[in-house]
Amino acid sequence: MLDIGTEAIKAVLFTLTSDGVIVQGLSREVHNAGDIQKGAVTDFAGIITTAQRAAAHAEKEAQMKTGEIIVVLGSDFLNALPVTFQERRVNPELKINEAELKNTFHKIYIQSLEKLRAHSLQEGSHIAEDVKIVDAYIQDIKIDGYDVGNPLGLEGKVIGFNVFYSFFSTALEDVITHLAGALGQPIHQVYAPSFSVSAVIRKDMYPLADFITIDIGGASTELALTRKGMVTGIKNFELGGRTITQRIASELGIGFWEAEEIKRTYTAGRLSSSVLKKIKDFIQRDVDLWQSGLDFALREISFLNILPSDVFIYGGASAFLDFRDILSRTEWYQSLPFSGKPIIRFLDRRFVKGITFLGQEGKNVPRPDIVSFATCRIVKERMDRSHLQDIFERIIRVVET
């Protein structure tokens, strides 16, 4: 599996067993300077080269070859959106058969595509006319407002579906195709981090509960709202840990990686009080902007409803001192639609159950690195897909071919 972020590409070579996931090899390769600028890819060839290097190192550590490739893309590359579809049936007394279901799935795809394009325009993306769906997961099925696992053979007036989509531009699809060619293996699936992490939380910690996840990455921060076991809202804004690093580099006149090390030292509290104050002063505006972005995103995904109090934080920049300070204050949430003080939990890879590391590999993994292992779990759990999911995915593949 390749987890492609704005700072680095992480490769995890894993095998599936009846008991869980066994991690055989790990690698983390930092992007070459200039390959990604402000969260956007500027050198696709460089990204592919870095991915090849990461995969090769993981294979060397595992002493085995990759069979197929799973790709994880963050919000800087991949869009995600849950879409709800409802249709009043012409003959509600007739039992739903597979032919009707296929027709309904085709309508869902057509209507969803328009919503995905509209979402892309609203978010300022340029992919509105060439949306490529890479994952369409049925989260919920209802008949006349009641949850059902399988609508086949049932009667009812109104059938409804909630589908979580992950999608990107056809330009990025070309990159994924070239990546598969360079690695000599097919790309089996592409996943969004917010979906993988939310699914693991739902299954292991809070089944059917309501909660919020906040992924603080290098170039952006993404929020996902889960209600009754479904991801119902996604929102991101372009501020993350890289923003702080670039500010430090600019103010001190130093290189990016030197600034990154200073940021880590600052977070660890290993600077003198005078230097700490100096850095805090010139990053304060960026920190305030991050808080404003967080507040706006939370209001957007609330849909004017009360927000759940369980908030899970993860991502490479989630350890940054000033971001954590904001979330620990009382005043940050008081103007937001929470029913009470949010319960903040910082997630790391230890929260993902069913992962076994061979040898010493697990000791070399940074604890905040939860996304890769959450995705490994989701790959295993989605191997046994439902018949309905298979039908829906086949229809999408046929229409998009």
Image (cartoon, grey):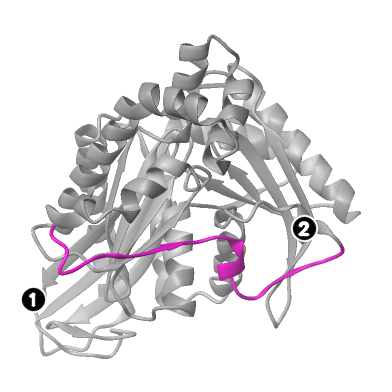
Residue at 25% in and 29% down: 124
Question: Where in the figure is residue 309, as x and y percent of width and height?
Answer: 26, 68
- Residue, far top: 253
Observer-nearest of 123 and 167 = 123
- Counting from the top left corner in percent of width and height, residue 340 is at 18, 69
Q: Quadrant of residue 183?
A: top right
Q: Residue at x 52, y 13 (%)?
A: 252
Task: Tell me where residue 330 sits by quadrant.
Answer: bottom left
- Residue at mark 2 to residue at mark 1: CA–CA distance: 59 Å
Q: Residues within 10 Å of mark 1 (few under 14, many from 20)?
A: few
Residue 304 visible within the image: yes
User: Which part of the image, by quadrant, shows the C terminus?
Assistant: top left
In the image, what residue occupies the spot 20% across and 55% down?
A: 333
- First in sequence, mark 2 or 1: give its number: 1
**Residue 90 marker:** 1
Q: Identify the disc placed on residue 271.
A: none
| Residue that badge 2 annotates | 363
Q: From the viewer's perspective, is 336 left or right of 119?
A: left
Q: Amino acid at mark 1?
A: Val
Q: Is 92 located above or below residue 77 in the figure?
A: below
Q: Nearer the viewer, residue 326 or 242?
A: 326
Residue at x 58%, y 12% (from the top left corner): 254
Q: Furthest residue to the front?
A: 273
User: Is 241 on the left-hand or right-hand side of 139?
Assistant: right
Residues shaded magenta: 337-359
Q: Residue 88, how many percent across, how many down?
A: 8, 73
